[in-house]
Image (spheres, grey):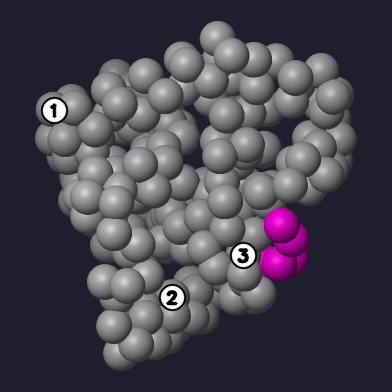
Amino acid sequence: MVSKVQFWFDFASPYAFIAAKRIQNITAPSLIHFDWQPFLVGVALRAKTRGVSTRQLVTVAEARYRKHDIHRTCEALGLPLRWPSSYPRGSMLAARVAFCARGSDWLVPFVDAVFDANFIEDRDISSEACVGGVLKDIGVEPTRTIAAATTDVQKQLFRAHVDNALASGIFGVPTFAVGDELYWGNDRLDQALQKAVGSEPNGPR
């Protein structure tokens, strides 16, 4: 019996980047099916802060700690990391493409490559040139794919997707959903796996 775990992510989030890498290294794919779901943290934060810039709410000490924590977590996992020269980067276009790719065999390679572009290669993932380059690199035709992902209908569908996630209780990333149970944060992946299969599959912590 295969258990399903929804993985909610935003390409702008370094903790979602780490979680995505950990998920791909889990060695029990026959037990767990990950359902990759793009999200926009900015929408949730704007609702939470009533339009106040989140940068104004984060202290210098908190921002310094987060960056240090991400570096040491990547180091512990053996993950390369190049802190983005612009942070956080806009993730809307890449998220729209990922939303259109759900159910395809290129969704996970696309997500992985966009995360790499942002957090390893320091490329501007908000640009059509970068997203198109990622699509081309994984063997997906970029022009038609981006056009399909950015029609008015698709934009409305994706916004409804994000709004429905907010209504279900998702407010940040990475979030893992096992049935109605939500686990927020990279450090909650193990708990989500335990809930899904009753024991932790072998994989990096």
Residue at numbered disc 1: 180
Q: Identify the residue at the far front of this view.
A: 51
Task: Name the residue that disc number 2 marks.
Answer: 70
> Is residue 198 shown above or below 25?
above
Q: Quadrant of the C terminus?
A: bottom left
* Foreground residue among 21 and 137: 137
SS label for mark 2? helix
Is residue 138 among the parts visible in the rendering? no
Residue in view at x 42 percent, y 41 percent: 40
In the drawing, does residue 86 fall left or right of residue 26?
right
* Along the line of sight, the residue nearer the viewer: 18 or 89: 89
Distance CA(mark 2)–CA(mark 3): 11 Å
Of labels 3 and 1, the one closer to you: 3
The crowd level at tag 2 (other Cα within 10 Å; few <14, some 14-19, many 20+) is some
Q: Which residue is mark 3?
A: 119
Name the magenta segment's main secondary structure. loop
Q: Is residue 194 above or below residue 168?
A: below
Residue 92: x, y in percent?
56, 39
Look at label 1 and name its amino acid. Answer: Asp
> Which badge, 2 or 3, comes first in the chain's sequence?
2
